[in-house]
Image (tube, helix red, strand yellow):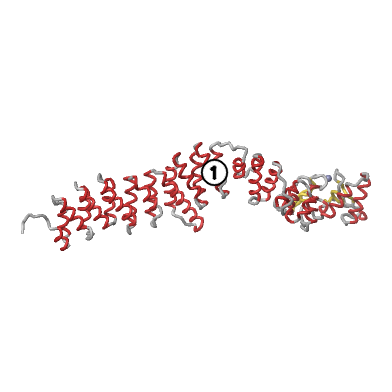
Amino acid sequence: MPLFGPPNVAQLEAKGDVQGLIKALLYKDAAVRLAAAEALTPLKHPIAVDPLAAALHDDNPGVRKACVGALAARGGLRVVNPLVGALHDPDANVRSAAAAAVYRRLMTDPDQDARQATVTALGKLRPADAVDPLIKAIMDADEGVRVAAIKSLQAIGDVRAIPSLVVVLAHEQVRQKATGRSSANVERAASAALDVLCGPNAIEPLTASFGHDDADVREIAVRRLAKIGSPLVADCLVVALSDEDPVIRRSAARGLQEIGWQPPANKIGANYWAALREWRRCGECGSDAIPVLISAFHHVDALEQAEIVASLLQVGWKPDEAEVADDMAGHYWVSQRRWDKCIEIGEPATHALDMFVQSAPVWRERVAAATTLAAIGQARPYPFHRLDLIRDGLALLDSEETADEKRAALESFLAHAHMYKPAAGERIEFCRCGYPAARVRKDGLREPLTDMLGFEHTGANSTTYYCPSCDTRRISVAR
Ligand SMILES: [Zn+2]
C-alpha cells in the first residue's frame, strides 16, 4: 500500500470520514477533488460548509459545480452567501447550477432566516435573473422575507416588479380595512419601492395593472400613474376615465387635472367632468354627454340628480314617453312644471316633487308641486300646514274682484275657517300683495297666520314662514 498515494474517496465515503473528504477537496488531482465534493453532498455535515465554500474558488469548473450541489443539498443560512456569490461564476454551467440552487432551493428553504438572507443578498448582488424569483418572494409566508424581497426589488430597480408591488400594497390596504390589521412594514416597503420605481418607465407596467380584477389594485395604479406628472400619462389616464369603478374614474380625472390636461368637448370630456361630478360642465360636452349623465343619475344624491337633469335639458334630452317612466322622467316633468305629466306618471315623480317643494324659490310653484303630490296620494306635512286653506286663499286673491272685495272675501273665508274672530275684536293684517299675513288681537298683539303660510326649517331650532303668494319672509320662530 503506497504511503503517499491519492486519497481513496470511495473508502473515505464508505467510512463516513468527513475530515478525510474535506482534505481530499484540496488534492492536486481535479478528479479527486470533484469526487470528494460529490461524496460530501449526501452527508450534509456542518464542518464541511466552509471548506466547500472555499472550494467554490477552485480552478476547475466541474469541482465548483459539484461544490454548488453539495452546499445546495445542505441548505440553511450558512450556505446563502457562497451560493449567491456563485451566481457570478465565470462558467455558464456553474452559474446555472447556482441559479437553480439559489432560486429554487434557497428561496424555498424551510428556514425563514435563510430565505430572508437570500433575498437580501440578491438585492446587493443584483443579478439580472433575480427579478422574477424576488417577485415570487413578495408573497412569502414570512413578513421579514416579504419586506426583504421588496427592498431588493427596489435596489435592482426593474419596473417589471411594479404590478406585483401594486398588488401587495392593495392587499395590505384591504386587510387593514377588513381586519384593522395589516403589515405596516410590508406596506411601507412597497410604498417606498413604488416611489422609487414609478418614473416615466413605469407607465407601461402601471397601465398593465388597469386590467386587474381588483378595483383597489386599479386605483393604486391610477394614482401612481397620475403622480408621474409626464404628459405621456394622459392617454393612459383617459382610458381609466371609463373604468367601472367611480373611485378610479375620479383618481384618473384628478391626475389629468394635475397635469393640466384640457378635456375635449366629446365623450372623453363628458367622462372627465362626470368623474369630477361637474354635471354642468359634463352637459357642455354636447349630446355625447347624454348617456354619461343618464348612467350617473342613479348613483348620486337627489341634489345632484336635479343638476344632472338640468344638464340633460341643456343638451336637449327628453324622456322617452313610450317607456316606463322613472325618476329621471319625474325630474324632467318637474323641471318643465308639467304637473299634469307628473300626475300621469305618478309614483316615479314623487322624488323630484319632494325636492322641488323643499327648495323651489317661488312659493306659488311649491304650492303647485305640493298639490301634485297630494293628487298622486303622497300628501306631505311640509312645507304647508294647511295646503287646502292656502290654495283657497290664493284662489280668492287671484280672482277678478277689486282689492277691497278680495279683502272682504278673504276675511270672511278666514273667519269661516276659524283663523280669527271678528266678533272678539280681532282683525286681519294683509301682506303687501294682498294675501293674509297675521291676526291682530284686540289688545294689539299680532299673531302670524302660520297655517296660511309656507314654512322652512332654518337652522336646528327655528322655522321661517313665507307668504306663499309673493315669497316675502314673514317671521322666524323658535321650534
Ligand atoms: Zn305676499
Q: Nearer the viewer, residue 191 or 372?
A: 372
Viewer-side residue, 269 vs 360: 269
Report whether 335 appears left or right of 91. Answer: right
User: Seen from this angle, which residue lies furthest front?
Assistant: 322
- In front here: 382 or 122? 122
Q: The C terminus lies in which quarter of the figure?
A: bottom right
Whether the residue carrying mark 1 lies under 8 Å from ligand 1 is answered with: no
Q: Residues within 10 Å of mark 1 (few under 14, many from 20)?
A: some
In percent of width and height, residue 127 lies at: 32, 45
Residue pointed to by mark 1: 239
Q: Callout 1, which amino acid? A: Val
Which of the four quarters of the rendered structure image does ligand 1 lie in?
Answer: top right
Give the number of callouts: 1
Above or below residue 459? Residue 255 is above
Q: In the picture provided, is 51 more to the left or to the right than 199? A: left
**x, y percent for residue 161:** 41, 47
Helix, strand or loop for disc 1: helix
Q: Find residue 469 and report its horizontal and vertical position in percent.
A: 83, 46
**In the image, farthest residue toward the bottom:** 15
Q: Is residue 114 visible?
A: no
Residue occupying the point 14% across, 51% down: 29
Residue 215 lies left or right of residue 446; in this view the side is left
Residue 290 locus on image (x, y percent): 66, 44
Would you say residue 237 is visible in this rendering? yes
In what quadrant of the picture does the N terminus appear? bottom left
Residue at horizontal 48 percent and vertical 48 percent from the top: 209
